[in-house]
Each structure stands twice: as C-alpha cells, then as structure tokens.
C-alpha cells in the first residue's frame, strides 16, 4: 500500500497541478486572465446573487392559458379524426365514426357521434387521445401520470383532463417558460442567471450584477405566442390598408416592414414545436431546422402536401417573422426555413422559434434590487470564517500530530485549491450557503487523517514497525472513511435534487469537498508520508 508505481505518481502530480491551474484565474486580474494561452482554463468562480448583488424578480405565470390551449388542441384533434374518417377510411358512410357538437366545457371536451351505432369504432378512434402519459412527477423517483380520461354517455364521448395531468401541464409550462426567460435574458449564457420554479405558477429570476429591474422586465415581458398560418394571396395594398381582407383572415405586421394577410386559424400552434436550431443546407447557406411532435407533424405534413408553391407565415406574438415558400411536402415532422439571412439572423430566428413555443403570460409580482455592498459584506464575513477555521485546523493538526500534521495541512491546502478549481471549471454558482459548505468541508477534510493517524498510533503502541504501522493504519481506517463519506455524499445528493437555490449551492460545495478531500486525505497524505518514511527511515514514527 505504501509503494507508488510511476503511473500513480504521475496521476497524483497531474491532479494537483491541474487543480492549481484551474484555480489560478481567480487570483489574477482580468487583463492577465485574458492574456492566458487558449489551452489554459480561464474561468473564475461564478458568484451568486447574495455575493455579487443584482436583480431579483418573482413572476406569476398564467398557466390557465396552457390548459385552454390544451383543450383547444384536443378539440382540434377530434375534428381531424372526424375529417380523416370521412376522407381516408374507405368505409361506407353508415359505418364511419364521425363527430358533431364538439365543444369545450370546463376541463373537458365532448363530441357526439353522428351515427350512434358506431360507438365502439368511435371509442377506438378517440382512445389514443386518452392513453398519453406525460411528465415525470418527480425528478428523482420518475414515473408518469394519465393526462386525459375518456368516458362515454350514449353517443357522446367526453375527454377530461385529470387533476394530475393539469398539474403536469402547468409544471411543463413553467419549465418551458423558464427556458424562454433564460434565452431572452441571457442568450449567450454569460450572465450566470438563476431560475427557480415556485409552486405550479411562479418563477423566481435572479440576475447577478444587474442594476436595472425595468430592463430585465422589458426583456421578459413579451408573451411568447408562436403559430403557423396560411398566407392569403391576391390582395392589393389598398385592400389591406382598408381592411378588406375577407372572412377568417387578418392583416398582421411583417418583421421586414409592411403588413401580410394570413388566415386567422393556425395550421399548427407553437405547442407542437419541439425543437428549432440553426443549421446549413446542401449549398452551405444558413437555415433554421425545426421539428414538430406527432400531432403537429401530421397537420403540417397534410398542409404542405396540399399547398406546394404557396407561402406560409410564422407568427410570433403579433408579428409575422418569416413567410417562406413551401418547396415540397414536409411529411417527416421536420423541415428548414431558408432565406432568413446570415448566421446571426438564423440564430436569432431559431431562438425566437424555441422561445415562442409556449403561450404563457408573465406578470411581475415582486422585484428587488440587491446592492453589491451586501455581497461584499457576505464575502468578507464568509472569507473571515473560512480563514479562522482554516488556521485553527492547521494549528490543531500540528499540535496533535507533529510532522504528520504538516502532511495533513498540505493536503488541506490542496483540498481548498481543488474545490476552487472544480467550482471554476464547471462554473457552479457560489452562494453564501456554498461558502458555509466550504467552511464545513475544512472541518471535515481532516477527519479522515485523524482516523488514520490514531490507527497508526495504536499500531505503533502494539510494537508494529513504522512501515507496518502506517500500512495497517491506512488499511484499517479506509472502510470507515468510505462509509462516512458515502453517507454524507448521499445526503448532499438528496439536498441537491430536492432542494432549490441556496440549498443546492450548499450541496454542490459539500459534494465537491467530499470528493476532493477523499483524494487529498487518503491518497495525497499517504504519498507524502510514504516518501518521507522511505527517505528518513524513522525508527519510530514522529506522531
């Protein structure tokens, strides 16, 4: 156990040097960090709102709109089923299961069969709409819930959103709304914002370093409503100016200026959009690639197959952002939008498409501006606590274990460097509870060494020689150390997955501290002490 082959020595040295390299940018001024070679890490610690100051906003999301949209979607699916039954079933009229009186009542959609004798076929056609299992109810335990139930009363069928299904729809709306906010407030991912859900209809946004809440609200406040519409052609500008656009149509401002007339009823809504990303076509030109879910793919495929050569409009909020021409049927649930512009405009449109995928209205309930002075005080207090705890542990280890205590102190310093480097490398946000986690790690980091050193003392008292005492001490203490750290790590993992905000910050630093302290306390100190022992050849261990 005290013999270290060359590969182990290389590994220990590499881990320590890499930890120093990743932690170093935190101690360099900005101009020095910018001048570092590209192969060296340059990330610094990401400070949370409580340390850096900034803006805190609490939003209320109108999730009732999501339920309404889901019911409209169900009603539309029933109409599509009825239409397909007429057009594509190939059955005689008296054997078709078509529906009438499709209406929404509360959280239910009802539809009545035109032919009451076809209740079983009608049930089979509607049954897939009630077999959709959505959303994991718990990110740790997993599982799903039944979103829609199907009931029959004579020739009338009723699809009802379940209570759990409504909750999952609301949570999913909050999740997607958070992604919208993230893309609008921090499109480049450089502001280190924090987003947290609160209940089923609240969102907390924290923007470190920001000083103007109104600017943040203006960036978030626009409602993200996305839809795809058929374009009405053959109208003059005079007709459009006078509002003579025909029934079921409306004139909408076009992003590039002027107005464009579209059908009011959407071909596909943004609810059916699952992805949009920048890409390149076969000619190397930048395009936007988009993907629909199964329902959206079916509707969009049918429309494009019947309207080749005609334009369709992509409407975001109250503006048409693009009106590409349909070059051919798009039957696979995905397609590309060409002629958008350069790669920057393509990126912007892709972001707009994804951020507009959910119609949720947000209202600001509370806003707070946290000054940087609060963060400075917190950093000063946390740093003082860390320094006091660090110095106290150093003196205790030297006083208790002499030269062995020095080795433990070297490991402790290395442990702090590795924690700082790991937090910087993965850009984990450091909060005030996170500093508390580091302070706690300082105290815990030497626990393993105390166990090991006490075992070594016991072995030496029983007459074991130095090499035997050290080898037995590390061997006997290892299982105890592993048990203690594994249970603490499990607790940190539970805090992270079930907690939010500051609790997660504490859990992150605690978990990282456990991993780094295992390396420094068990591997690094053993390497240092084994090297000393081989060179000094002590007759009795100075412990």
Image (cartoon, rainbow, N blue to C red):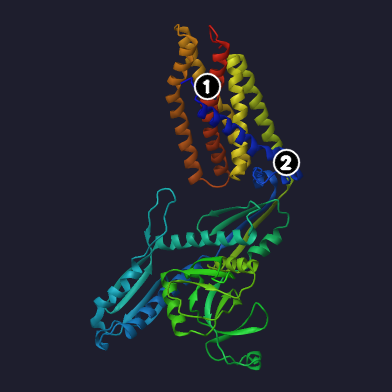
Question: Which residue is the site of mark 1?
Answer: 526
Q: Is residue 404 above or below residue 489?
A: above
The mark lying in front, picked from 1 and 2, is 1
Q: Is residue 167 above or below residue 438?
A: below
- Name the side, left or right, on which 254 lies relative to 119: right
Picture coordinates of residue 179, whole percent (x, y) = 56, 60
Picture coordinates of residue 543, whole percent (x, y) = 55, 12
Q: Which mark is residue 376?
A: 2
At a point 57% along the width and 70% down the height, the residue shown is 287
**Circle 2 sits in a helix, a strand or a loop, which is it?**
helix
Q: Kindly tell me whether residue 378 is visible in this rendering.
A: no
**Circle 1 sits in a helix, a strand or a loop, which is it?**
helix
Q: Kindly tell me whether residue 109 is visible in this rendering.
A: yes
Q: Quadrant of residue 178?
A: bottom right
- Name the side, left or right, on which 170 lies relative to 55: left
> Which numbered disc flags the more N-terminal residue, 1 or 2?
2
At a point 44% along the width and 73% down the height, the residue shown is 296
Q: Nearer the viewer, residue 114 or 445?
A: 445
- Name the side, left or right, on which 238 lies relative to 298: right
Q: Residues within 10 Å of mark 2 (few under 14, many from 20)?
A: some
Q: Residues within 10 Å of mark 1 (few under 14, many from 20)?
A: many
């Amino acid at each position: 156990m005290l013999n270290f082959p060359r590969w182990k020595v290389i590994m220990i040295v590499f881990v320590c040097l890499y930890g120093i390299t990743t932690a170093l940018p935190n101690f360099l001024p900005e101009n020095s960090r910018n001048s570092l070679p590209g192969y060296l890490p340059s990330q610094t610690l990401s400070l949370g709102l409580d340390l850096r100051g900034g803006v805190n906003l609490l939003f209320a999301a109108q999730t009732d709109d999501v339920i309404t949209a889901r019911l409209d979607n169900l009603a539309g699916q029933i109409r599509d089923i009825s239409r397909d039954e007429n057009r594509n079933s190939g059955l005689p009229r008296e054997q078709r299961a078509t529906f009438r009186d499709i209406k929404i009542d509360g959280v239910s959609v009802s539809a009545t069969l035109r032919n009451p004798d076809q209740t079983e076929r009608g049930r089979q056609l509607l049954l897939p709409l009630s077999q959709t299992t959505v959303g994991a109810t718990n990110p740790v335990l997993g599982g799903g819930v039944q979103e829609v139930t199907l009931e029959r009363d004579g020739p009338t069928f009723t699809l009802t959103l379940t209570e759990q299904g409504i909750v999952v729809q609301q949570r999913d709306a909050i999740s997607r709304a958070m992604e919208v906010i993230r893309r609008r407030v921090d499109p480049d991912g450089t502001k280190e914002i924090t987003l947290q859900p609160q209940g089923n209809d609240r969102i907390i946004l924290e923007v470190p370093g920001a000083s103007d809440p109104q600017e943040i609200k203006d960036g978030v406040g626009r409602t993200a409503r996305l839809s795809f519409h058929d374009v009405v052609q053959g109208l003059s500008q005079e007709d459009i100016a006078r509002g003579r656009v025909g029934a079921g149509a409306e004139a909408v401002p076009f992003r590039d200026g002027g107005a464009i007339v579209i059908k009011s009823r959407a071909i596909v809504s943004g609810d059916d959009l699952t992805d949009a990303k920048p890409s390149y076509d076969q000619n190397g030109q930048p395009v936007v690639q988009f993907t629909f879910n199964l329902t959206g793919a079916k509707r969009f495929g049918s429309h494009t197959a019947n309207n080749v050569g005609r334009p369709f409009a992509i409407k975001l909020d109250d503006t048409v952002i693009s009106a590409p021409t349909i070059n051919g049927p798009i039957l696979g649930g995905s397609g590309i939008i060409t002629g958008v512009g350069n790669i920057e405009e393509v990126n912007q449109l892709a972001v707009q498409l994804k951020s507009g995928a959910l119609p949720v209205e947000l209202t600001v309930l509370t806003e707070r501006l946290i000054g940087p002075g609060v963060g400075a005080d917190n950093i000063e207090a946390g740093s003082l606590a860390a320094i006091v705890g660090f110095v106290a542990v150093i003196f205790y280890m030297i006083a208790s274990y002499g030269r062995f205590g020095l080795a433990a102190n070297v490991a402790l310093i290395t442990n702090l460097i590795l924690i700082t480097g790991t937090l910087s490398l993965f850009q984990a946000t450091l909060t005030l509870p996170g500093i508390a986690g580091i302070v706690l790690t300082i105290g815990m980091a030497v626990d393993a060494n105390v166990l090991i050193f006490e075992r070594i003392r016991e072995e030496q008292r029983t007459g074991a020689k130095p090499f035997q005492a050290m080898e037995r001490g590390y061997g006997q203490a290892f299982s105890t150390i592993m048990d203690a750290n594994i249970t603490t790590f499990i607790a940190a993992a539970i805090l992270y997955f079930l907690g939010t905000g500051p609790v997660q910050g504490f859990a992150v630093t605690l978990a990282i501290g456990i991993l780094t302290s295992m390396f420094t306390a068990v591997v690094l100190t053993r390497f240092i002490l084994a090297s000393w022992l081989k060179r000094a050849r002590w007759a009795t261990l100075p412990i």
